[in-house]
Every structure is written in C-alpha cells, then in structure tokens.
Amino acid sequence: MAVGSLTPAEVATYVATQLSESFPNPSDRDGTYRGKCPDPNHPGDRNGDSCTLSATGLYQCHSHGCKGNIFSLHHKLSGLADKRESAREVYEILGRSPRKWRCCENADSPVVSIVKYGYEDESGATRRFNVRRNHANGSKCFGQGIPDSNARDGISYKIAKGTPNLLYKLPALLAAIKEGE
C-alpha cells in the first residue's frame, strides 16, 4: 500500500494521542521530537532520549537501531496482523477518511478527469497503467494499476508481486530496434 505522507500537524496529533509517554515534550523548532524509544520489540530499557521522531513521521532509536515511520510503529504497537488495517487505524486517529488516503492529499477536491497511460508488453497487450487524477482545485495525484474489467474504472490498484515492469511504448521501441533506428 502506498502510504501517503503526513503533515507536521498530523504527526503532532499522533504523538499527542498515541505516543505522549515516549515523547512527553513538545517538538524542537524543526519539528523533531526527542524521547524514549516507543518500539516494544527492541531489547533493553525504554529510558532516555535516544529516539527521534521527525515532523514527517520517521523515527529512529539511536541506542537500539530500530527505525521506521508512524505506520510501521503503529503496526507494532497495535498488534494487528494486517498492515493495511493498521494504516487505516492511523488515518482514523488523524481524522482522515479512508477515501482520502487512498488517492492523495487532495481527495477532498473532486476528481474532474482521469488520464490513463497504458504500458504494453511485447505483443501489444496492455499489462499496466499509470493513472493521473486531475482535481478541481488544479492539483494532481498519481497511481499505478493493472487492467481489471471488474474494477470501477477498469483498473485494479492491487499489483501482485512479480508483475513485470514495462517500458512505456515497448512495442514501438522494439520495432525501432528491429529496423535499426
């Protein structure tokens, strides 16, 4: 799952509601929190201020070497088996709707057009898409998917591991190579 980035305000909300024991003090001027490591899986005690959490949601414990982001940390703390469910929980804590995090930061602005860029294999069959969504406020967001006739817009955004990456306009490139261009 492509997890969206967090704003400094969202990081502050998450710290205040979920990590206040580990990071009891306000952030520095640059938005960095310093405190004890919140990761329950590392060896040793959880004292001191050897752990930093950035305004973008990345954390690193300088004593134990554990690191990650708010989503991976929440997954460890929540005990949920599914990382997607854990990410949904983080977004609910932050007050975001599931629809918003799926697309991009601009999901509150309606999508006015969708542009699909098809990636074809050697035989000319479309195997992947890059998709650009244009929002009413002028912003854009991007995603990747595979053809799926059962999906809402003909694209499934769940790409299986092992699905090959393809060059854009591969058949035309192969034809040009064959002709010696």
Image: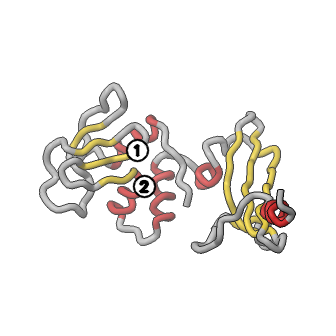
Q: Is residue 152 visible?
A: no
Task: Please state if 94 lies on the left or on the right of 134 as rendered.
Answer: left
Give the percent coordinates (x, y) of residue 45. Answer: 13, 55
Residue identified by numbered label 1: 57
Q: Quadrant location of residue 20?
A: top left
Instruction: Give SS at disc 2.
Output: helix
Which residue is pictured at 54% across the width and 49% down the height? 4
Give the percent coordinates (x, y) of residue 111. Answer: 77, 45
Which residue is pictured at 55% across the width and 61% down the height? 1
Among the two numbered marks 2 and 1 on one chain, the one whose residue lies closer to the N terminus: 1
The amino acid marked with disc number 1 is Gly
Q: Quadrant location of residue 27?
A: top left
Task: Please state if 13 lies on the left or on the right of 153 as rendered.
Answer: left
Give the percent coordinates (x, y) of residue 67. Answer: 32, 53
- Marker disc for residue 132: none
Instruction: Give SS at disc 1.
Output: loop
Does 170 appear above or below 7? Answer: below
